[in-house]
Amino acid sequence: MRGKVYEKIMITIITILLVILLGGSGTMIVKNKVQDKKEEQQYEKMEKKYVNKNKKKNKIKGTSDFDIEKMKKKNKDVVGWIECSDVLSYPLVKGMDNDYYLNHNALRQSNISGSIFLDYRTDFTSSNCIIYGHNMKGRQMFGKLLNFIKASFAKNHDTFYIDDGTMKHQYKLASVNLVSDTSEDYKISFG
């Protein structure tokens, strides 16, 4: 008799703990999804405000679509805008280190998604430029880059642009590799 009462109490306690755990987990998942959506909307607003869409329709090869001076009034670390058709379109920043923009957006506001940012040790005149961004589960930021592993996707999205505010530079995709964060691919100088 006493064992059955103890067993019922334990089952009740475990059930309550599981409900609390599942409720808390569900709340965190929803909260993160809402936060991701909010941050993505912030970047969409930045694009509307700082990238001239009319120029995109009437492209003059190499001319800038990005009002860098207007955006630099909000953040002096802005160095350009990076885009690849329907894959990504984000401001590009460069900080004093490679840590700050991991959790700050291009307007210097704290956020989980961070920014797309240029390695602090390089600039556009460097032989090798490394651009960082989060691989977001919701497919924002660099989340869609995993699609480049598929040859058909890479072939149809082989051109990307970096607009530095004075000129729009066109780049062709040469290769796609998945590498660890300790890979030699992160070297910016050799010798």
Image (tube, rainbow, N blue to C red):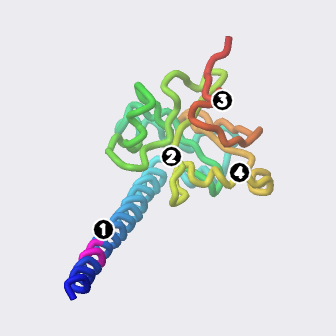
**Along the polypeptide, which appears first: circle 2 or circle 4?**
2
Quadrant of res 75: top left
**Along the polypeptide, which appears first: circle 1 or circle 4?**
1
Question: Which three-letter amino acid code belongs to the residue tagged 1?
Answer: Gly
Question: Which three-letter amino acid code belongs to the residue tagged 4?
Answer: Phe
Considering every residue shown, the one lying at the far bottom of the view is 1
Which residue is denoted by mark 2 in the rendering? 134
49 relative to 152 in the view: left or right: left
Taking the magenta stretch, the answer to whether it contains residue 125 is no
131 relative to 112 in the view: left or right: right
Crowding at dot 1, Cα within 10 Å, few <14 / some 14-19 / many 20+, comes out as: few
Crowding at dot 2, Cα within 10 Å, few <14 / some 14-19 / many 20+, comes out as: some
Q: Position of residue 86 (x, y in %)?
A: 63, 57
Element type where label 2 sits in the image = loop
Q: Which residue range is magenta in the image? A: 13-17
Which residue is denoted by mark 3 in the rendering? 185
**Of the residues tagged 3 and 1, which is closer to the observer?**
1
C-alpha separation, residue under disc 1 versus residue under disc 4: 35 Å
Q: Which mark is residue 24?
A: 1
Element type where label 1 sits in the image = helix
